């Protein structure tokens, strides 16, 4: 089958098309922020996998769940396999534009690997939308947004998560324009329609279910489960993790026929329809996030009026490429950003943004003035590779407190 059979609007437009949708106006400051963490809490794809993926029959519901383990170990295998494929990060302040396109080798784009698993589990768009609409606002995010509007700032949310459910969340909350929430495609029902049209539904979904049965058996065989008060806990052994990562690789790389390399994919098609759908999706990973933030800044007030904000590893490149950046409640983000912030209230971000707007041209000066104004209400510190293990732990603890223990990124 030709590649064009799986490529369509549902697999995501170009970065330029996404930027056009945001309707950024010339002039002024721009805040480009990750969505899950700084703006909304939770991870609805992880929540869907945790709820939907489990063996049939009598199952002990334990923490971490089967779905959480599958998500976490799949991410670990993907990260190990793609580390050598990722391009150098380049210079801070956007002096070097992100190179090339955006591919499955980007940090964070393994989100699309949940698609065949959720299809096999019977999940649909309405289910994902219900989960997304349940996502609470991060404390203080709505007030931060309103104050930024008063200050004349433009705001855009950039996420690896599926775009459409979060656009519904934006419409519901009212303080972030839906067109300014830029995310990844997740063509769940389009993939099902394609498989059925090609007569491939039964054979390919049976293959997914076989992978899940193997994965559940590995988790059961290499786990200990015990009752901790009122909660069942599961310990998954290192030997089991190694075997599950090997099974992940065999399923995605060999059975679905997926490649992470753009150059390799250009000369051939994946061996399955599901593989072709996954490869065709223009996922918003770390390089795409950086490209979107810089491109939108050029359409607005320029790179010197861009502030980026994020809490995860897939935000790191976007944070490094901006002159002003805030890593909030995440150790990887803090080490990538100019400024680190540990807080349970996004209104504290306003203090930093106001100081930057008022003419702060020295990071240390902005940090010092913010520390004096916040008076211990939040931890503000210098970002970069020199972030200590103690401060990194404070970031991780706050992230777990706000977003839950098993957030992948």
Image (cartoon, helix red, strand yellow):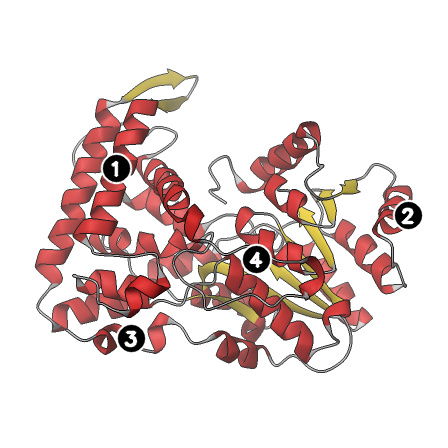
Residue drawn where x is 67% and y is 48% of the image: 327
Mark 1 vs 4: CB contact within 8 A: no
Q: Where in the figure is residue 123, as x and y percent of width and height? A: 28, 56
Residue at the disc numbered 4: 35
Disc 2 from disc 1: Cα separation: 50 Å
Q: Where in the figure is residue 175, as x and y percent of width and height? A: 64, 67
Mark 2 vs 4: CB contact within 8 A: no
> Nearer the viewer's eye, disc 2 or disc 1?
1
Q: Which of marks 2 and 3 is nearer the N terminus?
A: 3
**Viewer-nearest residue: 254 or 90:** 90
Q: Is residue 101 left or right of residue 150?
A: left
Q: Which of marks 2 and 1 is nearer the N terminus?
A: 1
Q: Where in the figure is residue 13, as x and y percent of width and height? A: 42, 76
Residue at the disc numbered 1: 246
Give the secondary structure at mark 3: loop
Residue at the disc numbered 2: 369
Residue drawn where x is 71% and y is 37% of the image: 386
Residue 7 disc label: 3
State whether residue 291 appears in this view.
yes
Disc 2 from disc 4: Cα separation: 27 Å
Q: In this view, does 341 lie to the left or right of 366?
A: left
Q: Where in the figure is residue 265, as x and y percent of width and height? A: 29, 65
Query: Residue 283 is drawn in which quadrant?
Result: bottom left
> Nearer the viewer's eye, disc 1 or disc 3?
1
């Amino acid at each position: 089958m030709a590649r064009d059979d799986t490529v369509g609007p549902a697999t995501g437009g170009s970065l330029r098309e996404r930027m056009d949708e945001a309707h950024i106006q010339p002039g002024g400051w721009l805040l480009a922020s990750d969505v899950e963490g700084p703006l909304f809490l939770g991870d609805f794809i992880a929540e869907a996998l945790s709820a939907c993926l489990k063996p049939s029959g009598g199952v002990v519901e334990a923490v971490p769940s089967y779905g959480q383990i599958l998500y976490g170990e799949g991410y670990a295998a993907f990260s190990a396999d793609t580390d050598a494929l990722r391009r150098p990060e380049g210079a801070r302040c956007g002096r070097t534009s992100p190179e090339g396109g955006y591919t499955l080798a980007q940090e964070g784009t393994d989100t699309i690997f949940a698609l065949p698993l959720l299809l096999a589990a019977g999940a649909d768009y309405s289910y994902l939308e219900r989960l997304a609409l349940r996502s609470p606002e991060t404390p203080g995010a709505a007030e931060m947004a309103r104050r930024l509007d008063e200050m004349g700032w433009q705001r855009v949310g950039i996420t690896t998560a599926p775009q459409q459910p979060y656009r519904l969340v934006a419409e519901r909350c009212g303080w972030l324009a839906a067109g300014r929430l830029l995310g990844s495609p997740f063509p769940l029902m389009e993939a099902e329609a394609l498989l059925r049209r090609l007569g491939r539904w039964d054979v390919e979904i049976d293959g997914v279910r076989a992978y899940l049965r193997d994965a559940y058996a590995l988790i059961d065989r290499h786990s200990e489960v015990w009752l901790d008060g009122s909660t069942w806990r599961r310990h998954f052994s290192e030997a089991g993790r190694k075997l599950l990562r090997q099974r992940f690789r065999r399923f995605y790389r060999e059975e679905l026929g997926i490649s992470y390399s753009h150059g390799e994919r250009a000369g051939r098609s994946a061996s399955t329809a599901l593989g072709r759908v996954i490869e065709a999706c223009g996922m918003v990973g770390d390089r795409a996030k950086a490209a979107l933030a810089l491109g939108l800044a050029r359409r607005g007030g320029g790179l010197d009026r861009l502030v980026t904000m994020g809490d995860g590893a897939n935000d790191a490149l976007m944070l490094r490429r901006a002159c002003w950046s805030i890593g909030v409640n995440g150790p990887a983000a803090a080490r990538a950003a100019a400024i680190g912030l540990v807080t349970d209230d996004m209104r504290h971000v306003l203090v930093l943004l106001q100081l930057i707007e008022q003419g702060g041209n020295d990071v240390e000066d902005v940090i010092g003035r913010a520390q004096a104004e916040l008076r211990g209400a939040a931890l503000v510190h210098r970002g970069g590779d020199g972030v200590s293990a103690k401060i990194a732990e404070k970031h991780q603890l706050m992230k777990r407190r706000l977003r839950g223990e098993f957030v992948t990124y």
